[in-house]
């Protein structure tokens, strides 16, 4: 157990969620479509988080990333649990900051959502997009680590552009749990953004391992 790594995950997740969430709130305040702003907010927020604290912890900032890292034996179970707890605390702190500076309506505007009656489709989109995200993360950190700090945020930006209308494009349980808790909107729909990303992380890892196995022969 390394407290520095947990602190890095907490601070990094705070940066990611604070920058992404405040970009949505700013877009709403300026009467600009959040669909045009949120992808850059979260993508650039992740870039900032990786540059600030990623060198300490590896820059997960997402329980789905930590799950895939554990499946790939890049982190042990105890530290994985510590990472997830730190990520959730960091995300809640970020939503708490938004509540303080902009109010509950602003926090609620950052909550993930999906079209009514499309729960299954939303879970599928979250799973597919998270699988893509984790396939990129696992591959680039292994094959081209010098490119990871920019490739991963760009991938998250693309994922947001692709998925926001269908599932909110969370691909991160901590990022969605935080505004639901702070904004008082937590309900059973939160399972979409827990089940989808975690299943997607496992699928992405499985594809990564299959490709790595082929490349070893």
Image: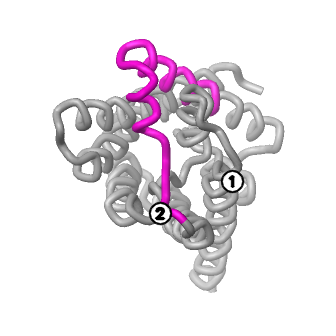
Disc 2 target residue = 115
Q: What element does badge 2 sit on? A: loop
Q: Which one is in front in this view, the residue at disc 2 or the one at disc 1? A: 2
Identity of the residue drawn at 23% across and 30% down: 29
Disc 1 target residue = 191
- Relative placement, left or right, of 123 versus 159 is right
Residue 146, image x, y percentages: 38, 50
Residue 124, image x, y percentages: 58, 71
Specify which label sits upstream in the sequence, 2 or 1.
Answer: 2
Q: Nearer the viewer, residue 21 or 7?
A: 21
Q: Nearer the viewer, residue 178 or 187?
A: 187
Identity of the residue drawn at 48% across and 41% down: 111
Give the image quarter of residue 203.
Answer: bottom right
Identity of the residue drawn at 37% across and 37% down: 20
Give the label on residue 134, or none.
none
Within 10 Å of the Cα at label 2, are there few (<14), some (14-19), or many (20+) other Cα atoms?
A: few
Disc 2 versus disc 1: distance between alpha carbons?
15 Å
- Relative placement, left or right, of 8 versus 190 is left
Residue 86, image x, y percentages: 65, 28
Q: Dividing the image into 4 quarters, which one contains the N terminus? A: top right
Q: Nearer the viewer, residue 24 or 135?
A: 24
Residue stretch rendered in magenta on the structure:
87-116
> Can residue 174 be seen at all in this image of the molecule?
yes
Q: Magenta: predominant secondary structure element? A: helix
């Amino acid at each position: 157990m390394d407290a520095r790594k947990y602190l890095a995950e907490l601070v990094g997740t705070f940066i990611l969620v604070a920058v992404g969430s405040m970009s949505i709130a700013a877009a709403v305040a300026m009467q600009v479509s959040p669909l045009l702003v949120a992808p850059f907010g979260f993508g650039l927020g992740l870039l900032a988080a990786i540059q600030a604290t990623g060198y300490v912890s590896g820059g997960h900032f997402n329980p789905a990333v930590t799950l895939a890292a554990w499946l790939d034996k890049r982190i042990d179970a105890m530290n994985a649990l510590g990472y997830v707890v730190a990520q959730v605390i960091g995300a809640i702190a970020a939503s708490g900051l938004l509540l303080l500076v902009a109010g509950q309506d602003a926090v609620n505007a950052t909550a993930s959502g999906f079209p009514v009656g499309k729960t299954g489709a939303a879970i599928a989109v979250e799973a597919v997009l998270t699988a893509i995200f984790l396939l990129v993360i696992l591959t680039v950190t292994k094959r081209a680590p010098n490119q990871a700090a920019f490739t991963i945020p760009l991938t998250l930006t693309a994922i947001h552009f692709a998925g926001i209308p269908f599932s909110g494009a969370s691909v991160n349980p901590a990022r969605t749990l935080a505004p639901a808790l702070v904004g008082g909107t937590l309900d059973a729909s939160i399972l979409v953004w827990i089940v989808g990303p975690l299943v997607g992380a496992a699928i992405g890892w499985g594809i990564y391992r299959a490709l790595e196995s082929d490349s070893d022969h």
